[in-house]
Image (cartoon, helix red, strand yellow):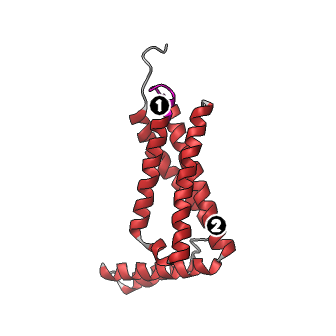
Amino acid sequence: MENSLRKSAINYGLYIGVILSAFTIIGYIVDLTILTKWWLGLILFLVILALGIVSVAKGKSILGGFMSFKQAFTSWFLTIVVGLVISTTVNILIFNIVDPEAAEILKQMTIESAVSMMENFNAPQSEIDKAVADMENDNQFGAVNLLKSLVYQFLFYAVIGLIVAAVMKKKDPDAA
């Protein structure tokens, strides 16, 4: 991978990492309930998607308008990896080192939200009780669980990256 292409992908990854971390830090400082909202996840997904695509487009521009599938995917994936690693590191620091109590508060908020949603869907009480027990036994903000989540996110975004790379690739007709 060309040095300028790698540098561009890393820069966009840094943008993603800063944006995701800023949302977490602002949510932590202002109001933890923000971090439990479904729309925040949607916004952050769209930010990652947009910056990932912009990163590939910028890489294509750097390469003179032509980019192989491998170059496009590598640009996408490097951007995503850098951004998500930064974000996960910030989450580990905040919720495991700086303020583990905030993780517990968020867990309780998540449980309350899940119970409310299940009740709205008329779920049987036995299913609600089982879900609550499972959530209480799981430390979703523990370092191990955050790292597991990171791996799953890599896989999820790799699939999207395959699609983006297939769309963005463009073979140079002058290349042999």
Residue 92: give its label: 2
The answer to whether 166 is drawn above or below residue 117 in the figure is: above
Q: Please, what secondary structure does the residue beneath circle 1 have? A: helix
> Residue at point 53% right, 38% down?
75
Indicate yes or no whether the magenta region holds residue 67. Answer: yes
> Residue at point 64% right, 61% down?
89
Residue 70's spot in the image, x, y percent? 52, 32
Q: Nearer the viewer, residue 121 or 73?
A: 73
Residue 79's spot in the image, x, y percent? 54, 45
Q: Please, what secondary structure does the residue beneath circle 2 have? A: helix
In the image: residue 91, left or right of residue 110: right
Q: Say which quarter of the image contains residue 94.
A: bottom right
Q: Nearer the viewer, residue 77 or 133?
A: 77
Label 1 is placed on what type of residue?
Ser
> Residue at point 44% right, 46% down?
160
The answer to whether 58 is drawn above or below residue 30 in the figure is: above
How far is mark 2 from mark 1, CA to CA? 36 Å
Residue 61: give its label: 1
Label 2 is placed on what type of residue?
Ile
Magenta segment: 59-70
